C-alpha cells in the first residue's frame, strides 16, 4: 500500500507546470493540485489529495485518500487514476469527457470501470460541473457521482453546491450528502488559489458533514 501512495504522490508531482486560467473548471488545461477534507459528523474525517490536468484532448486525474477515525487508527481508503477523452459542443459552452478509471479499494483490492466528466456554462455566471464513475472488481461494485452547481460573483467570490455521492452496492452502504457553501479565488502572479467551505447533510447516513478544501492552479 505504501508503494501505491508513493506512485500517487509521484503523479501529483509531475503534473504541476503551466499557467492558471479557470480555478473552478476541472477540465482547465492548468495543472491543479488540491487537498479536500470531509468531516463526517462526530465519526471520522477523510482527507483526499488530488491532482488533475488536461493535455491535448485528454483529461487526467489522480487521487489518494486517508480516513481519520476519531476513536481509532488512521487508515488508507485507497487511490485511483482516471483518464477521459474530451469533447466540446459547437458553441463552446459545454465540455465533457468519457474515459476509464482504475482504483485500489483498501482492503479489497483493485477495480476498474468507466468515467464521465462535464462542465457546462449556463449563463449569468452559473455553471454545472459533474463527475461520475462506475467501477467493478472482486467483491467491488461502486458508483461515484459528483453533481456541482456554481455561480461566480465579484472579487473572486462564488457560490457552490458540490457533493460527492458514493454508492457501495456490494456492502449496501450509501452516502448522499446535499449542501451549499462559498468559495474564494485568490490570484497571484504564478498561480491561482481556490478556497471553499461547504456544510452538507448526508440524507442516507442521517448525519451532518462539512466539506472544505484548497486547490492551486499553476
Image (tube, rainbow, N blue to C red):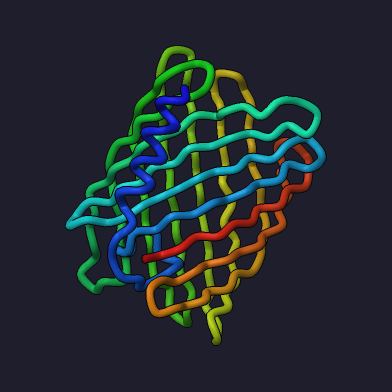
Residue drawn 44% across the image and 32% down it: 5
Q: Is residue 173 left or right of residue 142?
A: right
Q: Is residue 98 left or right of residue 148?
A: left
- Image coordinates of residue 168 in percent, x first then y, are 56, 27
Residue drawn 35% across the image and 30% down it: 102
Quarter of the image for residue 24 reads bottom left
- Image coordinates of residue 163 in percent, x first then y, are 59, 51
- Using the image, determine if residue 130 lies above or below residue 104: below
- Using the image, determine if residue 58 lies above or below residue 192: above
Closer to the camera in the image, 91 or 119 = 119
Residue drawn 67% across the image and 57% down it: 179
Quarter of the image for residue 137 reads top left
Q: Is residue 110 left or right of residue 212?
A: left
Q: Quadrant of the C terminus?
A: bottom left
- Image coordinates of residue 141 in percent, x first then y, are 47, 23
- Using the image, determine if residue 89 lies above or below residue 84: below
Q: Is residue 65 left or right of residue 24?
A: right
Which residue is the extreme one toward the left? 56
Residue drawn 22% across the image and 57% down it: 87
Amino acid at each position: 500500500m505504501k508503494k501505491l501512495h508513493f506512485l500517487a504522490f509521484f503523479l501529483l508531482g509531475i503534473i504541476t507546470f503551466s499557467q492558471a486560467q479557470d480555478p473552478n473548471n476541472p477540465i482547465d488545461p492548468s495543472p491543479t493540485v488540491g487537498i479536500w477534507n470531509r468531516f463526517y459528523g462526530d465519526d471520522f474525517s477523510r482527507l483526499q489529495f488530488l491532482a488533475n490536468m488536461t493535455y491535448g484532448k485528454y483529461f487526467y486525474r489522480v487521487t489518494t485518500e486517508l480516513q481519520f477515525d476519531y476513536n481509532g487508527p488512521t487508515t488508507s481508503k485507497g487511490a485511483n487514476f482516471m483518464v477521459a477523452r474530451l469533447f466540446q459542443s459547437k458553441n463552446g459552452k459545454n465540455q465533457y469527457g468519457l474515459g476509464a478509471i482504475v482504483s485500489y479499494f483498501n482492503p479489497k483490492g483493485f477495480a476498474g470501470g468507466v468515467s464521465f466528466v462535464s462542465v457546462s456554462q449556463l449563463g449569468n455566471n452559473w455553471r454545472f460541473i459533474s463527475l461520475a464513475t462506475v467501477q467493478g472488481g472482486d467483491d467491488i461494485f461502486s458508483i461515484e457521482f459528483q453533481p456541482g452547481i456554481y455561480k461566480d460573483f465579484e472579487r473572486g467570490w462564488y457560490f457552490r453546491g458540490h457533493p460527492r455521492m458514493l454508492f457501495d452496492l456490494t456492502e449496501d452502504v450509501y452516502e448522499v450528502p446535499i449542501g451549499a457553501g462559498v468559495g474564494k479565488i485568490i490570484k497571484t502572479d504564478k498561480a491561482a488559489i481556490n478556497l471553499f467551505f461547504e456544510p452538507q447533510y448526508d440524507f442516507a447516513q442521517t448525519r451532518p458533514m462539512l466539506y472544505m478544501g484548497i486547490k492551486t492552479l499553476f
